[in-house]
Image (cartoon, rainbow, N blue to C red):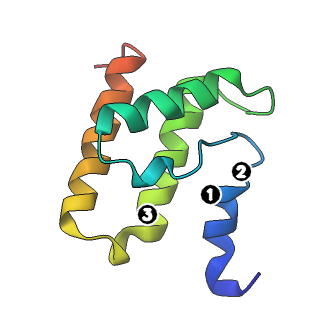
C-alpha cells in the first residue's frame, strides 16, 4: 500500500464496518444511506452508535476524496447524508 492510498485501504477494509462494495459509487443517495445504515447496524466491531459510525464513514470518504470528486458526485453524497439522518430519525 502506498502512502497516497491509505484512505482507500481504510474505506475498503474498515475495521469498524463491512461496507457493500462500491457503496460510494451508487447514484441513489437513499441507496447509499441504506447500505451504510445496514453495515453499521450489523457490525459488531464499531466503537460508537450505528448512526455515528455510518455518518463518520461517509464523511471520511468525502473528506479524503473531496478534491478529486466532481461537483455532481459531491451533491449525491451530501444528499446521502440527509438520507442517512432521515433513516436514523435524526432530521
Side of 70 where 38 appears, left or right? right
Q: Is the C-beta separation of discs 1 and 2 under 8 Å?
A: yes
- Please identify the quadrant where the C terminus is shown: top left
Residue 63 image label: 3
Q: Which residue is mark 2?
A: 14
Q: Is disc 3 surrounded by few (<14), some (14 to 19) or many (20+) residues within 10 Å?
A: few
Marks 3 and 1, the one that precedes in the sequence? 1
Give whichever of 86, 48 is nearer the camera.
Answer: 86
Q: Which residue is mark 1?
A: 11
| Camera-side mark, 3 or 1 | 1
Residue 12: image location, x then y, percent: 66, 57
Q: What residue is at 77 percent from the left and 81 percent from the top?
A: 1
User: What whole-number distance in Å separates the C-alpha atoms at marks 3 and 1?
Assistant: 12 Å
Q: Is residue 24 above or below residue 46?
A: below
Choose top left, top right, bottom left or bottom right for residue 46: top right
Q: Is residue 87 above or below residue 15?
A: above
Q: Is disc 2 surrounded by few (<14), some (14 to 19) or many (20+) residues within 10 Å?
A: some
Residue 81: image location, x then y, percent: 34, 38
Amino acid at each position: 500500500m502506498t502512502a497516497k492510498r491509505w484512505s482507500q485501504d481504510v474505506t475498503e477494509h474498515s475495521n469498524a464496518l463491512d461496507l457493500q462494495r462500491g457503496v460510494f459509487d451508487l447514484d441513489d443517495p437513499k441507496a447509499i444511506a441504506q447500505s451504510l445504515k445496514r453495515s453499521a447496524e450489523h457490525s459488531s466491531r464499531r466503537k460508537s452508535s450505528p448512526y455515528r459510525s455510518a455518518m463518520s464513514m461517509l464523511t471520511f470518504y468525502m473528506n479524503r476524496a473531496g478534491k478529486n470528486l466532481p461537483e455532481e458526485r459531491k451533491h449525491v453524497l451530501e444528499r446521502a447524508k440527509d438520507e442517512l439522518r432521515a433513516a436514523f430519525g435524526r432530521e
